[in-house]
Structure formats: C-alpha cells, structure tokens
Amino acid sequence: MASSSFHLHAPHHIKAIPKITIIPSTKRPTLSYPTTTTTTTTIIKNKAHTFGVGALRSNNGVKPLEPSSEVNETPLKIAIIGFGNFGQFIAKGIQRQGHAVLAFSRSDYSEYCNQNGIKFFKTLEGLCNEEPDIVLVCSSILSTESVMLGIPFHKLKPDTIFADVLSVKQYPRNLFLEVLPPEFGIVCTHPMFGPESGRHGWAGLPFVYDEVRILKGSSQAQKCAQFLSIFQKEGCRMVEMSCEEHDRHAAGTQFITHTIGRILSQLNLESTPINTKGYETLLQLTENTVSDSFDLYYGLFMYNVNATEQIDNLDKAFEIVKQKLFGRLHGILRKQIVERVPMQRFQRSVPEGKPASYFLPDNKKMNGFSSFAMPPEPAEKLSKEQDDEKDKATISSRFPF
C-alpha cells in the first residue's frame, strides 16, 4: 500500500513541523520531523505489558531506566488537585524522591502543608500560575469532571502533563482527551494501593499506567519518564496496561471486593471467641471496604462499563449456590417424609413401641421453621395409600421445586 502524507501547521511552542505518514493499519503511525530525530506518539495502546521495578517501555522493547540519559535530573514541580487522605499519601512519596509538591483542595489544608513543606493554594488560578510540570488529579470520581472544567488551562505551560489516580481509567482518559488542549500530555495511572495497604512502603505494590498522549523524544516525554520513576524508585511493580484492559480487570477484582464487603457489612458481623482465620479475613474485608466512602463504591459502579455485568454474574452465582443447597435438601426430605427412610447414621436406639427418630427434630424444636417441620401425627388411622397421598401433597405445597 503506497503511503501518503500531509503537513500540519505547528503550534507556536513547537519548533519543527511534523509530517504524518499514513501507513498500513498493521503498523503504528509515525511522526517524522525534518531533522534527524524521529518520534512516535501512541494515543491508546491495545496490549498490556508488565515490567519489573526500574523498567520502562521504549520503541525497541523494554530496557532499564538510566537516569543520566533517560530522565531529566531537575526536580519536578507537581501540583495535586484534591488533597484529601489519598492526595496527602501520594505527596509523601513524591517528596521522598526530591520533587516539589503544590496542593489545591476545596478544604483548607494550609496548616498541614505548612508543616510538611508543601505550598497550598486556595484557588486553581493561583496553583496554575506556578506553572507545574505535572498536574495530578486526586479528586473523587464523581467530582472529576467539574474539577477539570474549572481549571484555567491557559495559565499552564503548553507541555504540561495531566495525570490521574482514579480507580477507573476509561472515564478520565476520555474526559482528558475531550477537555484538555491537544498539546497537553496525558498519563492515566492507578496505584493499586492506598494509605492502609501502603503504610509500610510501596515495595512490590502494583502501579498501573497508560501513556495516553505523550510526545516521544521531547521534554514532555522526559518529564513523563521522570514522573513514573517516582513510583519505580519507591519500589512499585510497574504495570503498563491500556485503560480498557484495566477496567475489565478492575471490575472482576476491585469492584467485586467492594461489593462483597458492602454485602457483609449489612450482616453486622462481629468478632467471636472462636474466630477462624477465614472469618477474620471477612471481618477485615468488611472493615476495609466500609472505611471508604460510598461515593467511591458508587463511582466504581457508575463509571466502569463492566461493573453491571459483574453484578449480574454475582447474582447468578448466588442463585446457583441456593439451587444446589435446596435441591439436595429436597432429596433428603423426600426420602424421610414420603418413603419414611430414617437416617441410619444418626439413628438412636429407642424403646420398643416408639417410632424411630428421623433426621429432623420434632415440631416443637422446629418452631419458627414450619417449612422444615414434620407433619403432626394423624388423628385417625389412614390407609397406606391415603397416607402416601397426604405426604405427597404436603411436599408439593411446602417445597415447590
């Protein structure tokens, strides 16, 4: 297939005018400059790659980061929008790596920031006037759109990179692509840990990222690599993954975990003197999930297109388990009630002249569980045929399987 090309007028901050070469769809589009430098821009990646600590993908595969050549040594200026518990948690890791942190939040955290060497701003205008290299959005899922629409983008540098830490990824990616100026970089990230699970350090904890829009070979790419190296140097297990694949995995892991925890919380489970390890795990799961706001859980459901399917799967799975339980119970009761077969394993010796004990206790002990109680003795003697017919009618009415 022959290639064709056309030229774009470059924005004022780009010195060289790129030429976009149209090539077969099996290959990625390449931006080639009139100079000897060739750069590649990846908009959305379709395949996930997992890397060890200290590795980033290059055009030729995976290679370790070499700070002297790959990463600009000048400390970054990182602005965090949304400075609640998670924003403060991430800020500590950023500061440990020697970068400057700026903060904005609707609540006043000026005292905390003064004590921790962070510059706090009460307005987005003031924050953007500082021209940060990275704007890290740490707002809630539900408020992200209103936050983004309130940012004065014209006050930022043209190579500014926007990143997020939301628990869903397709939603912020699409929002960023829609509202941000085209020259701004976009990196979607999700630290798969938080203040509780990461309180003893980030070593070995997964950090998912997708370089949605980064101009390769530019200062923007250097800043992006430097930003990601913060988490690499903190020991995170770096996982490069597309936003679509992240959301598929998250629906089957994070959303299910929160859902089970929320269900268990409705049972008001309490610790007992005979807790098993499994039960203690359930108690811990319940505590961890309900400690997060319901808005977070709702955001996981509302803004992940795969969440509804998981709710349906969970409902179907519960029905299957119930059917297996009641199906087996129905067989046992039929043998005991209709065929009058006692459970030999549990049969006790009884005085002569008294009926044998069956698996279920008598009616008095089954008070409140009438569906499982044995029918009372008939007032008059019935024939065997009449007795069988009555037992069959009893089962049909009480166990309509």
Image (cartoon, rainbow, N blue to C red):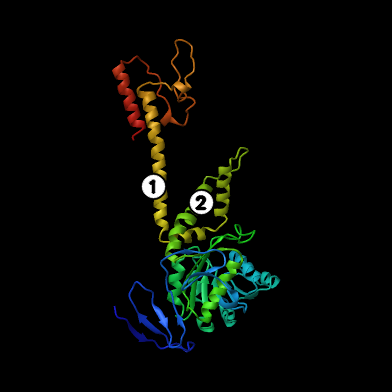
| Mark 2 Cα-neighbour bin, 10 Å: few <14, some 14–19, many ≥20 | some
State the residue at coordinates (49%, 56%).
Answer: 254
Q: Is residue 337 left or right of residue 224?
A: left
- Residue under circle 1? 316
Work out whether residue 377 can be spotted.
Answer: yes
State the residue at coordinates (48%, 55%).
Answer: 253
| Mark 1 Cα-neighbour bin, 10 Å: few <14, some 14–19, many ≥20 | few
Q: Residue type at mark 1: give it.
A: Lys
State the residue at coordinates (60%, 81%).
Answer: 130
State the residue at coordinates (57%, 60%).
Answer: 205
Q: Is residue 257 left or right of residue 394?
A: right
Q: Name the spot of residue 18 as percent of width and height, x first.
A: 42, 85
Work out whether residue 152 can be spotted.
Answer: no
Q: Nearer the viewer, residue 19 or 360?
A: 19
Q: Name the spot of residue 119 as percent of width and height, x first.
A: 65, 76
Above or below: residue 210 compared with residue 69: above
Q: Secondary structure at mark 1?
A: helix
Seen as rendered, the residue at the extreme top is: 352
Q: Secondary structure at mark 2?
A: helix
Marks 1 and 2, the one that precedes in the sequence? 2
Q: Name the spot of residue 30 as percent of width and height, x first.
A: 40, 79
Residue 234, quarter of picture: bottom right
Residue at mark 1 to residue at mark 2: CA–CA distance: 18 Å
Q: Residue type at mark 2: give it.
A: Arg
Q: How many marks overall? A: 2
Residue 105, quarter of picture: bottom right
- Residue under circle 2? 262
Q: Name the spot of residue 84 as percent of width and height, x first.
A: 60, 66
Q: Nearer the viewer, mark 1 or mark 2?
A: 1
